[in-house]
């Protein structure tokens, strides 16, 4: 095992430990919430949280990816002032777009309550939960990028665990007191806001430690030679993120809009169980991306290939084993833990596992293209997938409901990952050929 892969596994280990603990705690959270609320209200919870995520991502430029890519370049060149200025520019841009997202959420909340929740009275919860989360995430993406580039994965892990413990404690309290939807929404709000603010505080402290108290006074003019490149990268990641809202992140809203909050509740549970296969995989893109960006900057193509190949083997082995376990035990697990009213979630779970197997195996498909500076390719792929997904949703979901949505998500994973991996290896081969010459 080479040094690069060892470092990735070490950093992933911090996040994996946190993810494992958080997933376990989240499962308990979900069980308590599901049993307390019932299918329809459980679906309503998912609709409120998903609506907030959707609106927030509409204005998001994925500043963590920009910070990682361009800070890695300047740090490898020993240019600390420009590295600090990248972070400053990202903070300012993200804060501005977050305020835009806040305004959008306040304006769109009545529509979310009427058409997705099918209950105008829930508008208060759309605004309260959404507004608080958006403001708590004011600088979250940029902060995450800085912690990643400086390998502060242990701090991220500790914050993630703390957030999960706090959320579980509040949901357990709501369960013991037989609280309703409002108590559970508040529990998620407090936990998520605390986690986001913790990451932001850790990143600002790290910036002060690295660059001194005056780092924020570096002029933005230092980035003038790259302003066009930075703008194009940010816009491409924003468009890619916006398109992924259709492909992956708005599932519950489509189901509730075209069918009912009850079916959204079934689908929410299927997603929660399917996410078990992502438990050790989800940290890998964030820890792999900084390393890939450094190796690409150094033109160490052999290391790039080695890391991706070994990572795919490990990811496939884990995902296949857990998927088989869920296939065999998923139905009795749902009946025992969540009660039999949630059993219709099982067929959707099986469909989702097929797509997750492919997506997990090639978990690096997007960040590998970003490391080569081709943020436009994920955007183009997501655009094509969005057209496919929207057409499929409008044609199939009104007829077959949440099962059609699960099948469409699995298909979009398979198609999108196949295209991204193909493009990446063609680009990598071209870079290698140029290096030989």
Image (tube, helix red, strand yellow):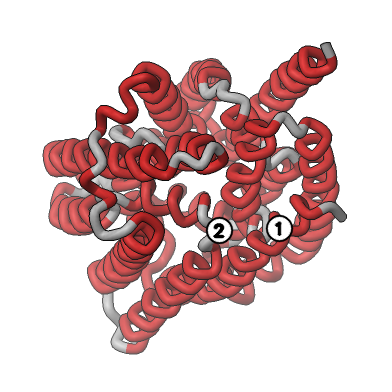
SS class of the residue under badge 2? loop
In the image as oriented, which residue stretches furthest toward the bottom? 176
* Neighbourhood count class around disc 2 (C-alpha, 10 Å): few under 14, some 14–19, many 20 upward: some
Residue at 52% across / 75% down in the picture? 25
Q: Nearer the viewer, residue 253 or 162?
A: 162
Displayed quadrant of residue 170? bottom left
Q: Which residue is mark 2?
A: 151
Q: Nearer the viewer, residue 31 or 370?
A: 370
Q: How many marks?
A: 2
| Image position of 388 (left or right of 229) | right
Displayed quadrant of residue 185? bottom left
Q: Which mark is residue 7?
A: 1
Q: Is residue 389 above or below residue 133?
A: above
| Image position of 355 (left or right of 63) | right
- Dots 2, 1 in contact, CB < 8 A: yes
Displayed quadrant of residue 208? bottom left
Q: Is residue 38 above or below residue 373?
A: below
Residue at 67% across / 54% down in the picture? 281
Residue at 71% across / 23% down in the picture? 424
* Neighbourhood count class around disc 1 (C-alpha, 10 Å): few under 14, some 14–19, many 20 upward: some
The x, y position of residue 4, in whole percent, is: 75, 50
The x, y position of residue 133, in whole percent, is: 26, 56
Q: What's the CA distance linking mark 2 and mark 1?
A: 9 Å
Q: Is residue 256 visible?
A: no
Q: Is residue 250 above or below residue 139?
A: above
Viewport quadrant of the C terminus: top right
Q: Nearer the viewer, residue 268 or 373?
A: 373
Q: Which mark is residue 244?
A: none
SS class of the residue under badge 1? helix
Q: Is residue 228 visible?
A: yes
């Amino acid at each position: 095992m080479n040094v690069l892969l060892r470092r990735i596994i070490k950093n992933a280990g911090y996040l994996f430990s946190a993810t494992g603990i958080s997933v376990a705690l989240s499962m308990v959270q979900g069980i308590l919430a599901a049993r307390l609320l019932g299918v329809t209200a459980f679906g309503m919870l998912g609709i409120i949280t998903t609506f907030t995520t959707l609106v927030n991502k509409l204005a998001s430029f994925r500043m963590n990816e920009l910070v990682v890519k361009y800070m890695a370049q300047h740090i490898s060149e020993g240019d600390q002032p420009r590295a600090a200025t990248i972070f400053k520019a990202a903070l300012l841009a993200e804060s501005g777009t977050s305020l835009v997202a806040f305004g959008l959420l306040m304006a769109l909340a009545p529509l979310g309550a009427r058409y997705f929740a099918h209950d105008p009275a829930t508008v208060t919860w759309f605004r309260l939960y959404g507004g608080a989360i958006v403001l708590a995430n004011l600088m979250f993406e940029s902060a995450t990028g800085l912690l990643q580039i400086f390998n502060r994965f242990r701090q991220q892990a500790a914050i993630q665990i703390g957030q999960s413990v706090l959320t579980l404690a509040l949901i357990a309290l709501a369960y013991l007191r037989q609280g309703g939807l409002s108590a559970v929404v508040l529990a998620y709000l407090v936990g998520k806001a605390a986690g986001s603010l913790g990451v932001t505080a850790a990143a600002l402290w790290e910036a002060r430690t690295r660059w001194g108290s005056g780092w924020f006074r570096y002029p933005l003019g230092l980035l003038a030679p790259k302003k066009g490149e930075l703008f194009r990268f940010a816009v491409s990641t924003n468009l890619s993120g916006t398109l992924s809202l259709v492909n992956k992140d708005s599932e519950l809203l489509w189901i509730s809009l075209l069918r009912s909050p009850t079916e959204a509740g079934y689908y929410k549970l299927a997603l929660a169980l399917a996410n078990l296969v992502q438990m050790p995989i989800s940290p890998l893109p964030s820890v792999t991306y900084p390393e890939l960006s450094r190796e690409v900057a150094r033109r160490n193509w052999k290391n790039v290939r080695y890391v991706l190949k070994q990572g795919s083997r490990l990811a496939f082995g884990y995902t296949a084993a857990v998927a088989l376990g869920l296939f065999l035990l998923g139905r009795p697990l749902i009946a025992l833990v969540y009660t039999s009213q949630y059993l219709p979630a099982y067929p959707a779970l099986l469909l989702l596992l097929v797509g997750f197997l492919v997506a997990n195996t090639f978990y690096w498909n997007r960040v590998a293209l970003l490391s080569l500076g081709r943020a436009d390719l994920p955007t183009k792929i997501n655009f094509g997938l969005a057209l496919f997904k929207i057409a499929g949703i409008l044609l199939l979901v009104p007829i077959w409901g949440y099962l059609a949505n699960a099948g469409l998500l699995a298909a979009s994973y398979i198609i999108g990952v196949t295209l991204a991996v193909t493009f990446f290896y063609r680009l990598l081969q071209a870079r290698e050929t140029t290096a030989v010459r």
